[in-house]
Image (cartoon, helix red, strand yellow):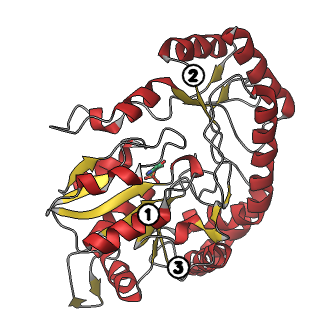
Amino acid sequence: MLSATDERMFVTKSFLPPLGEYEFYIKKIFENGQLTNQGPLLKELEEKLKTFLGVENFHYVTNGTIAIQLALKALGIEEGEIITTPFSYVATTSSILWERCTPVFVDIEPDNFTIDADKIEAAITPKTKAIIAVHVFGYACNIEKIENIAKKHNIKVIYDAAHAFGSLYKGKSLLSFGDISTCSFHATKLFHTIEGGACIVKDKAISDKLELIKRFGHQGDEHFCLGINAKQSEMNAAMGLANFPYLKEILSNRKRICDLYDSQLQGLIGRPKKQEDIVYNNAYYPVLFKDEKELLAVFAALNEKQIYPRRYFYPSLNKLPYLKDAASCPISEDITKRIACLPLFNDMTDEKVNLVCDILKGSLK
Ligand SMILES: *Cc1c(COP(=O)(O)O)cnc(C)c1O
């Protein structure tokens, strides 16, 4: 367990609301006795998040992985090829495999690490059913180009927007694009409900289907389709409601921290290129080293001071040991070897940012 005096610094640290504010919601649960099954706290949280994001068909579910699986199921994709990115958390690929589809990897843009839309069409075959792209680290995919390709080839678009909560593209939430966008509210994410996730669905009929399949596929005694249990508990919704009022503060604190990192590290280390039309959520602070050797040297220096950055993301997902015949993705394979995320959490002080930067600079010399 971490004690209050523990000086170790990790890449993320979960935001915790004042205990009394969580208790306020837990008391409500004890009063009304409803623990799960689309309870009042879950509905209240869904309404708040819908308003915050400016979206219509919003489903709060148990995690961000099942959200991707529900998305595939709701879109009727049961087999075939899914074009996806090799640069993401493993859940993007594993949920495709778990749904018995085949991931087809398309390499990424070196500038912002999202799927390279110019390379998608060459990977489309008669078996292609969908594109699952990731707004990785909160940076936007090439939304217009991906939408045009999908229309032209009559395939679906799912965005794994697990990192994109709070990012805006052309003034709209990054979670409002594609046929379905999914999100994660895991404890390590910018906004969390301990465990949790969401599906944001464009089409009302598909949203209704998702509503059914996330609750076993039946209503009362009438069974409509194969379903699963992705219902979220009231205890988790309570954490979301207690965290919600702090969202603006969380976003602005992260911006302050990232601005300080920027000013300290400018010109010393590789950074994603700033995008137009984007308001970033500052969910992560990725840095790109010259090579893996430099990364490992900086990690060793930081680890010595009990600072633990993470290799987000490593390995390139096309290199997962349980995949057969995955296409090579040279850009992703190169970047995954030399990219890392620096510590970034809500109550990170300027001193801590400066400490990380000083060690990093010392080790780069
Ligand atoms: C965290 C994450 C997920 C999985 O979300 P869980 O809520 O942990 O299941 C999926 N995709 C990406 C890109 C993630 O970072």
Task: Answer with left or right where residue 292 lies relative to residue 18.
Answer: left
Query: Which quarter of the figure is the C terminus placed in?
Result: top right
Q: Which mark is residue 289?
A: 2
Mark 1 or 2: in front is: 1
Residue receiving disc 3? 39
Q: Foreground mark, 1 or 3?
A: 1
| Amino acid carrying mark 1 in the image | Lys
Mark 1 and mark 2: Cα distance apart in space: 30 Å
Kind of element beneath mark 3:
loop
* Image vertical order of residue 133 relative to residue 257, above or below: below
Q: Nearer the viewer, residue 153 or 251?
A: 153
Q: Quadrant of residue 302?
A: top right
- Residue 141 in the image: state x and y as whole percent: 49, 56
Question: Residue drawn at (74%, 23%), measured in percent from left and top?
Answer: 356
Whole-number angstrom distance, CA of label 1 to CA of label 3: 40 Å
Kindly identify which residue carries mark 1. Answer: 145
Q: Which mark is residue 247?
A: none
Q: Earlier in the sequence, mark 3 or mark 2?
A: 3
81 above or below 213?
A: above
Residue at figure coordinates x 68%, y 48% from the top left: 282
Q: Amino acid at mark 3?
A: Gly
Q: Position of residue 308 (x, y in %)?
A: 61, 24
| Secondary structure of residue under mark 1 | helix
